[in-house]
Amino acid sequence: MGTTLVGSSPLFLQSGLVPRGSRIIVFESIFEVFLLLGTLVGVVVIGYMLYNAYKYRSGATKGDEEVGDRPVLGELPTGSGGGRKLATSFFMSMIIVVSLISWTYLTLLYVEEGPSADNSLDIEAEGYQFGWRFTYPNGHTTDGVLRIPAEQPVRLQVTSADVFHNFGIPELRVKTDAIPGQETETWFVANETGTYTAQCYELCGAGHSYMSAEVIVMPPDEYEEWYESTGNGSSESVSTENQTAFVEARPA
Amino acid sequence: MSDTDPERTDGGTEVGSEVVAGGHEDDHDHGHDFPGTGSIKRWFVTTNHKDVGILYIVTSLFFLVLGGVLAWLMRIQLWAPRAPGETILAPVAYNQAVSAHGLLMVFWFLSPFAFGFANYIVPLQLGAKDLAFPRLNALSYWLYLFSGILFGVSFFQGGTFSGGWTMYAPLNVPTFTPDVGASTAVLALVLFVASVTVSSVNFLTTMHRMRAEGLTLRNMPLFSWTILLTVWMMLFAFAALLAALMVLSADRLLGTTYFAMESPAGALLWTHLFWFFGHPEVYIVFFPALGVMAEVFQTFTGRRIVGRKWFIIAMVLVAIQSFVVWMHHMFLTSINLQVKTLFMITTIGISLPFDLMVFALIYTMLKGKIRFTTPFLFVFGALLLFIIGGITGVFLGAVVLDYEFRGTYWVVAHFHYVMVGGVTALVGGLYYWFPKITGRMYDEFLGKVHFAAYFVGFNLLYFPLFVAWETPRRVFDYAPELAPWHQLATIGGFVLGLSFLIMFYNLFKSAFTGDPVSDNPWEYATTAEWAVSSPPPLENFEGTPTYRDGHLSFILDRESDVTGGATAADGSGGATAGGGVATSPHTAVTTEYEPTVEATEVEGPSHASIWPFVLSLGAFLILLGISPLQDAAFPEGMMGAAYATTAVAGFGVTLGSLIAMGLEPFHGPVFDEGEAWPFSGIDNGKVGMWIFLASDVVLFGGFLGAYIFTRFAFGWTGWQPVPDDPIPGLVNTYILLTSSFTVVLALVAAEKKHKLGLVTSLGATFVLGIGFLVNKALEWQHLFHEGLWLSTNVRTSTFFLTTGLHAAHVIAGLIIALYLTARAWRGAYLEDNRSVEYFGLYWHFVDIVWLFLFPLFYIL
């Protein structure tokens, strides 16, 4: 599958340095590196801070002999020396941050390019207070459930019928805003069959907590079978338990 | 205290109590009608920057408690995932708690808390006797308080705003959030922004114009530097927010359709307007904390900051860049890859200066003599928390990761580490300046206990949120396996909140019974607030502070030059020097200064005015009165009548207090011009007017930007101008241009002391302005007759609202013109024509705005 996705990608995307594949792989591999480096930098910096706070505590007064010149009330503010050290640490941090971000930028290019139109499934998603509607290429619409085949890239065109929502399937690492009057695009691919949950990630009103949809990833042949059975303009509606309960719980 | 020489403490005590007494005497000497600090009345009339600072601090702590209780409600709800029907707060109530918590903490607690210190400390650090416009300073405070009360009222009008602190459109319009309280909350924000704007103008004028001799910008203490940059950011960012809020208010109250669901790009327009303000706001909130960190680090490590120049440059860069990163909040909207790339780069660019600042603070500790007092502990803790907040922020800068973190608790945890990290530093600032403000020392042991509880509570609350980051924001039905982390967080929330009880107890008790302190209880403090008594006298300094010899000294009026500064004595040890300052100038001063006071009694600076309070009350009543408007109509029946009456009464009170304020004899602080770059030689009032107009430019910029953005989304060429006939607009252009000319004539007449010419020219301006409004009214009448109304479509909405905002500026100008004419008739302005000049500036600005509006709304 990976090869089909990056067929037209520039060389640097194929070098192996830049994570590619499903959005899960992309996210996990970058997140791991960030977590590792972030923890490392955090431990070093905070450790250094604590060490020096202890070393130069007032009781130790080692500093006094080294620096006789302490600040005096009423002086015009000036700085202490140590500029070289400051510059060195600054440039080191700059190199770390800039190289990390540049590295992820290459992945961003890959993610933004998305799968090619030929082998992907295009689905429109529309958020409303408080659920999700999906429209397939043949005009079939479903409400509250998204069926997709495993292993095939899915391209989503997302919009909203009322307020600002955000469509996300956390386990498949796909997310995009659902904005009234606008269309946003995103893509994902599910390699494993099963049932996932799509959720709203932008506060959209009373039912925000329960605004979810079922995402059913089917084996490709089963999916084909199901898709053939859907006619032009037909529709199906599956409310999740929560949604129904919520709607009932709402005051009239 | 372990770190203070006992001998000195004793000495300090004596001096301290003497000074306190002196301070009180001072109050009585100066105040014609100025009651002492014990009197309730004083707190309603005071315009003194130190009093206003105390009011800000106390009030903001009240809002901290309110916002904190709302947070507790949320944390209780989040103890376990809540299925429908099992919630503790109803879903809408939870959304209200989330929204109100965010709004209260960001607007009504954080910035005002920091500005309490700014009010109290900045004039002292600058060597000014007060802010440039003391009554405006009191006005900022009262507007702030009343805006907070108005927000409180919103809870009782069917429920407050429930669309999140980001107030995304179109959830923020009445179609989706119909409660009157939601409108009131928006209006409360408008009032808050008014307070901020007044305050920004005041601080900028003061900080640029009223620095002691030798205190160039480059030499300013770091806390003052952070406030200066904060206020510049505030001036522009809050003007953009004001535009957004005024449009939103119009959508809610008058029925315009900018953000309506059907609007071509309403939702996106809001995100642009909001985040253009919202990102600078992050630094507006954080910079003062950074300033506190820098001051407290220097004092308690006994070291001057490493790389001071670079530290300042880094902050200036951040302040400027903060206006070009807003779209990183919108990476998942429909913006394209090029824009994303640009904003990713600016975002990384703005994070780097912070690395430098953090390293500078850490390296300042080296070779120090660090004393772990309560202020230092809090500030040290704040830096540690900020480092964690910063590192987790870099994750968000990687767009691919941001895609997945969007709308999750990663964001929540990150910004709480940064924001509440900032609060941690400000709490350190409260302990740091407490002895200066009250003249008494807090209990060090309880302070340390507070820090321990606070720091544990903080991390217990926010760190688990990183672990449970997959939880979607503002959702209470989360994945069950995350529940233990949320329970930890809830426990932490209570520890953090309750830790403040220790602080309240400690500070309240110490304010009355703590050990009296000397001028400077902290060894190695350098800034000028520590060179005056604790608390400082009403007008801050005996004598004029100057740095012309490279250190602080005071020039007394009679005596030529008495060296005050800490540099007295041998300068070998800070401690002895500190003691020395406290005694010598004060004994000298109490004898030398008094005659001067009497001499200037007649024209001495004023410190009391009730009108800022009354004016704010009036503004409060107006906004409360119009809160139930829908489609520009009051609701039917008694309720509507009561609201309408409130609005009318509020209008009367506002207008009356404005006039009273204009007529009230009030003398601002006298100052000998010291450093005033870049406004030396320009009058304070003029500088203030220019700065205000700069913010007004951004306000109109916001409106015009909204118009152009909407029109592009609609299709530029398909959009016909609303008035089919541009002639009335053209006539109005000529009328306004002529009126600009008559204002110039008025000033010339005033300069020539030609009373009749002055009255005639001002009168002509007034008549021309009326002509403009009458012509506009006829034009609008005609349009209404054709069935075009504010709510008809987005074209009419933008037309009526933008030109309406301009008309409101004209009306305000005419009220001033009428007032000026009346006073000129009675012989005013011939000696001092500055009021006419400032009015002229304003009037020209209003005319220039029209020159932009006319082609945009009538021709193109």
Image (spheres, grey):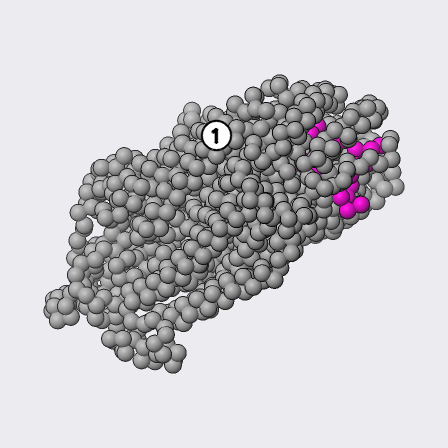
Q: Residue at x 21, y 68 (%)?
A: A191
**Residue B140 found in image quarter:** top right
Tell me the element at label 1. helix
Left or right position of A140 against B570: left
Of the 4 image quadrants, the one containing the N terminus of chain A is bottom left
> Is residue B56 found inside the magenta-colored segment of the image?
no
Where is residue B477 drawn, in percent x and y?
A: 26, 45
Left or right position of A107 against B33: left
Chain containing the residue with disc 1: B
Q: Residue at x 29, y 45 (%)?
A: B485
Q: Residue at x 61, y 62 (%)?
A: A84
Q: Which residues are magenta?
A: B528-557
Where is residue B636 drawn, in percent x and y?
A: 41, 30
**Residue B119 found in image quarter:** top right
Instruction: Please name whichever residue, B629 or B547, is drawn nearer the observer in this view of the structure.
Output: B547
Q: Main secondary structure of the magenta part?
A: loop
Per the image, the residue denoted by label 1 is B446
Kindly identify the amino acid type of the residue bearing the numbered disc 1. Answer: Leu
Where is residue B403 drawn, in percent x and y?
A: 37, 60
Seen in the picture, residue B334 relative to B654 is either above or below; the reply is: below
> Is residue B530 found inside the magenta-colored segment of the image?
yes
**Residue B520 found in image quarter:** top right
> How many numbered callouts?
1
